[in-house]
Amino acid sequence: MLQIITGRFFEGAECHITDQKAVLFSNYRWVRPFRLIMGTFEPVGDGTVSSWVWSYQHLHPKTPGSFSIVRAGTDEVLDQFRCFAIFALRAFF
């Protein structure tokens, strides 16, 4: 799903773009936001548990005619990003 929302499968195609945000909690601490191809991952607040906001764009192709594809897979996108963050940052999310 991360490859789909970043537009890798729709190169050159006209796409619907939906701005999305997700909140994750972690034991990982950092001061600055991360800018990734998948969006921006930024820390929020200074509590004992770190809060993070992931801002990304959900892309899905426009279809010809009156048929339209509905945005789907938000839970899968968040779960895959969470797994990516666990692996890349070696922390719990």
Image (cartoon, grey):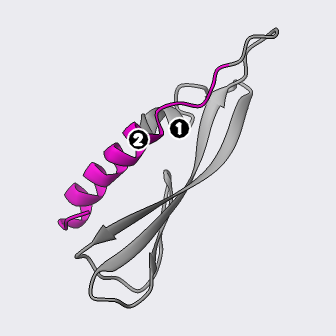
Asked if 57 appears above or below 30 in the picture, the reply is above
Relative horizontal placement of residue 27, taking residue 71 as reference (left or right):
left
Q: Position of residue 36 (x, y in %)?
A: 47, 59
Q: In the image, which disc is placed on residue 75?
A: 2
Relative horizontal placement of residue 44, taking residue 63 as reference (left or right):
left
Q: Residue at x 33, y 79 (%)?
A: 50
Q: Secondary structure at mark 2?
A: helix
Residue type at numbered disc 2: Asp
Asked if 40 appears above or below 46 in the picture, the reply is above
Q: Secondary structure at mark 1?
A: helix
Q: Position of residue 21 (x, y in %)?
A: 55, 58
Residue toward you, 63 or 73? 73
State the image quarter where residue 16 is shown.
Answer: top right
Residue type at numbered disc 1: Ile
Q: Quadrant of the C terminus?
A: bottom left
Which secondary structure dominates the residues rendered in magenta? helix
Relative horizontal placement of residue 25, taking residue 6 as reference (left or right):
left
Residue stretch rendered in magenta on the structure: 69-93
Q: Earlier in the sequence, mark 2 or mark 1?
A: 1
Q: Residue at x 27, y 88 (%)?
A: 48
Q: Residue furthest right?
A: 65
Residues under labels 2 and 1: Cα distance?
12 Å
Label 1 crowding class (10 Å Cα cut-off): few <14, some 14-19, many 20+? many
